[in-house]
Image (tube, rainbow, N blue to C red):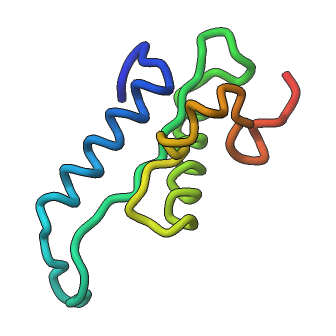
Amino acid sequence: MLNRAPLEQALAAAERVREAIEALNLPHEAPITHGRVTASIGVATLLPGECQTSAERLIALADEALYQAKNRGRNRVWPDPATHAAQPSAPPLGPEAAAPC
């Protein structure tokens, strides 16, 4: 967890972690005997005072982002750090994110 980090900083940190794991070039161990170890990372942030601000909410958003990363092909960070800057008002993650206060 990065306390008080804006989304862009959290995405950059997650991408550095993903790249470092990939650079290790570690083979999978049994039962998966093909390919290399990679990481999919979901990133989420909440601002103080936002509707439903809680640790549980943050974990749920990060979990949804992790599933998005895996569904988009694995070995990636989601939201995508390369395209997120081009979308400053990206929609919230998950169906519960749209719930009114």
Query: Is residue 18 left or right of 48 when viewed as pictured?
Result: left
Q: Nearer the viewer, residue 31 or 8?
A: 8
Figure quadrant of the N terminus = top left
Query: Is residue 96 left or right of 38 when viewed as pictured?
Result: right
Residue at image location 71% in from the left, 47% down from the top: 94
Residue at image location 47% in from the left, 26% down from the top: 8
Please provide percent x and percent y for residue 91. Answer: 74, 36
Q: Quadrant of residue 74?
A: bottom left
Please provide percent x and percent y for residue 25. Answer: 14, 67
**Count of numbered circles on the image:** 0
Figure quadrant of the C terminus = top right
Query: Is residue 83 left or right of 38 when viewed as pictured?
Result: right
Residue 47's place in the image compared with 95, above or below, is above
Residue 42's place in the image compared with 28, above or below, is above
Residue 64's place in the image compared with 3, above or below, is below
Residue at image location 43% in from the left, 13% down from the top: 4
Which residue of the protein is positioned furthest toward the front in this rendering? 86
Query: Is residue 23 left or right of 67 when viewed as pictured?
Result: left
